[in-house]
Amino acid sequence: MTTIKLSIVIITISASLIAAAGLYKKTNDDSCSDTDRFCTFEDLSQEYSEGEDWKVETRRASSGLLVSAIHGGGIEPATSQIASAIAGESHNFYTFKGMLSSGNFENLHIDSTHFDEPEALEMVDAVNDHITIHGAEGEEPKTLIGGLNRELAEEISNQLNSSGFSVKKAPDHLNGEDPDNFVNQPKSERGVQLEITEAQRESFYKNGDTSFSSRNDASNQTSAFDDYVGAVKAAIEGES
């Protein structure tokens, strides 16, 4: 009986020492989103390879604005293309693209409050203003708007509404108001988050096709894509 108790104590102590030494590999913790496989970019990059499973694309400009899509590529389809078009050559652009043949969202999505890819952090820290493009579920074409830059958010809402697009205030779980959210990491500590529903993104491509081949061929973009991008650009210019 004494031997059994001693063995249990030794096993318990050993497990505690291993955990304290950081030897347990853990890709998630209690602070992560329940739907995310990884909490940090470091964890993700240990499992998936740059250039094969994911890639970062950037353009730098002298503007004080960054337009980003941290869930680009196959994670939230078409968000990279929308962000790139809004940024154009005048503003800074960043996107993290999922490149898996399937399961991009399930495997490569890192919540916005935990997203810490180094180049993304460096770029957002260097600007005053920030607009992030995300994809949301939804069969109704609309944009759910949030973030802490209320003035720019209102201007974007007005321009999109004037161009015939539906814009609603984002619900709490998508409102981008957490100070730790990537959208709120520029120097001003506030940004605008656009959560664009699946139906709205599908309207930007012929036959509603947001597949890899379709969204990477600009000739498949509809007039709705151009109108949407133009409205956001007008809002940016109006706030400049």
Image: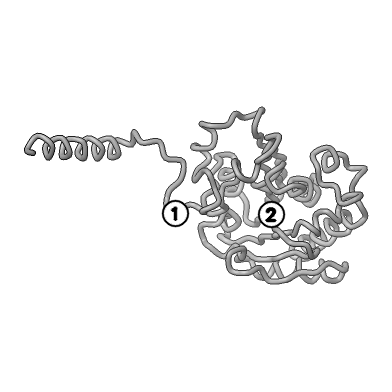
Q: Residue at x 80, y 69 (%)?
A: 166
Count of numbered circles on the image: 2
What is the three-letter code of the residue carrying label 1? Ser
Query: In the picture shown, does residue 129 fall above or below 177?
Result: above
From where the camera sits, is residue 156 visible?
yes
Q: Which of pointers 2 and 1 lies earlier in the amino acid sequence?
A: 1
* Along the viewing direction, whichever of 190 and 70 lies nearer the viewer: 70
Q: Residue at x 59, y 29 (%)?
A: 49
- Disc 2, SS: strand
Location of residue 205 in the rendering, given as x and y in whole percent from the top left corner = 87, 50
Q: Nearer the viewer, residue 156 or 11?
A: 11
Tell me where residue 81 appears, x and y as whole percent.
Answer: 78, 46
Q: Is residue 159 visible?
A: no
The amino acid type of the residue labelled 2 equals: His
Residue behind mark 2: 134
Residue wearing tag 1: 31
In the picture, the quarter occupied by the C terminus is: bottom right
